[in-house]
Amino acid sequence: MKADLVVKNGQVVTPQQTFNGGVAISGGRIVAVNTDDALPDATRVIDVKGQHILPGLIDAHVHFRDPGLTHKEDFATGSAAAVCGGITTVVDMPNVIPPTENAEQIGVKKKIAESKSLCDFAVLGVIHQTNVADILPMAKAGAIGYKIFFGETIGNLPFPDDGMCMEVFPAITESKIPLCTHAENRQIQHYYTNKMKAEGKGNPIYWEDTRPWICEAEAINHIIFLAENFGTKLHIVHCSTKQGAMMVKDAKARGLRVTAETGPHYLLREPKDMAEAGPLLKMNPPVRTKDHGEVLWRGLNEGFIDMIATDHSPHTLEEKGCDINGKMLKPAIWDCISGFCGVETSVPLMLTQVNAGRMTINQYVKVASENPARVWQMYPKKGSLNIGADGDLTIVDMNKEAVIDPRKLHSKNVPTPWGGWKVKGVPTCSIVRGNVQMQDGEPVGKAVGRMQTPVVYW
Ligand code: DOR
Ligand code: ZN
């Protein structure tokens, strides 16, 4: 029987092995993974000679800003940036306007995104002080999980206080889907921010001092305690500290279902880089010194940090308070908004590190595809090359070199601290359920993106 699409003559990569061959897709699903001579005939054949065929890569932390903040990004531009960056599925954050805080808003986002997304997506519902009754309905409406913003961040969503957590956590546990948390202690944030302001330390290099390691670590400790007591599946987003990473390691060792992600900026950048990158590198939590990055690298390689996710958070340059090169145009770093683009640059940055020997390509596939799918309960439909899995592939050329150019990114606004970075290892084709959505760095497909709901509960 003829397949719809065969991608062949590549090196197929799974977390366990790399072998010469290809993948066949029919009806949007994988029907064969094999050496070239054993693949079926197909209506369309893509010869990827010399390149690697990876399961579709997942960015489990993006802010596509739709609805309500579409002057920053929307699902059309965000998903174009995703597929151009080799990402075939994203998990979208709920700090939009109105917030994704009840079943109705889950449905609103599904409708918006399915009308314009080039990639598949899953949606998180936010939990705050007054919507405990919406927790189970959001799961029924197809949320992949929940988010609580314990730290102060964009959207200023009020988090549930400790008393309300006595109701919130059991409800989350009952829903069988995970909770992810932005883990920063607001009072510690405020204390240090006020101190920096009083001392007039408005230079970008001091941004980390407003949220030192203890700010994140205290919050992670607190949340793990709640999750452990209420039996809640917990995922820590953008883990930036070695102390936080070790708490996640300990929780795993105790048998808890606690997972964590980190991003390229926490692995490759430091506070001193803010002298040059300025507000472009301003993010919450902030980038930290190398000793933190080293532990996060170890975590990714040893398995106590589960995944790479970017926290893609675009803003206009005016909101960022700087020009495209990072020159600060506002009086102080606290006047500049935090967040920057990441969904399009993560794969080339990380493949460059694979080429440099910091991680095997098999382990990269694990932390950039299999693990995000497992944590968000989409595995093995997503995150695998199993027969019957969605036909999502990311083709990468490990020998191709490029320089990251902000003007070539596909987001609506392109503030990035990665401009000028040389990369070796570039995505050349993104395939979503058998549809070619990016070829040679440009979006080519239609709005085929579909909302993903949990396929297993574990
Ligand atoms: O710096 C940040 N910006 N951190 C977050 O957690 C949210 C994000 C945003 O939405 O812009
Ligand atoms: Zn975020």
Image (cartoon, rainbow, N blue to C red):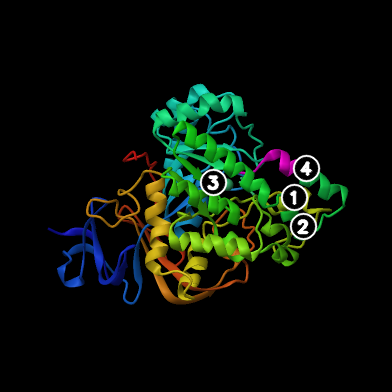
Q: Residues within 10 Å of mark 3 (few under 14, many from 20)?
A: many
Whether pointer 1 and pointer 2 mark residues with C-beta atoms closer than 8 Å, the reply is yes
**Which quarter shows the C terminus?**
top left
Alpha carbon separation for disc pair 4 and 3: 31 Å
* Residue 119 coordinates in the image, percent (x, y): 42, 51
* Residue 10 coordinates in the image, percent (x, y): 30, 72
Mark 3, residue position: 64
* Residue 311 visible here: no
Mark 1, residue position: 210
Q: Residue at x 62, y 38 (%)?
A: 150
Q: Amino acid at mark 4?
A: Tyr
Magenta stretch in the rendered image: 183-191
Whether pointer 3 and pointer 2 mark residues with C-beta atoms closer than 8 Å, the reply is no
Alpha carbon separation for disc pair 3 and 1: 27 Å
**Which quarter shows the N terminus?**
bottom left
Which is more N-terminal, label 4 or label 2? 4
Per the image, label 2 sits on a secondary structure element best described as helix
Q: Residue at x 77, y 42 (%)?
A: 191
Tell me if 48 is positioned left or right of 125 in this view: left
Q: Amino acid at mark 1?
A: Thr
Which is more N-terminal, label 4 or label 1? 4
Tell me if 286 is positioned left or right of 199 in this view: left
Mark 4, residue position: 191
Q: Is the stretch drawn in magenta largely helix, strand or loop?
A: helix
Alpha carbon separation for disc pair 3 and 2: 28 Å
Indicate yes or no whether the magenta region holds residue 186.
Answer: yes
Mark 2, residue position: 206
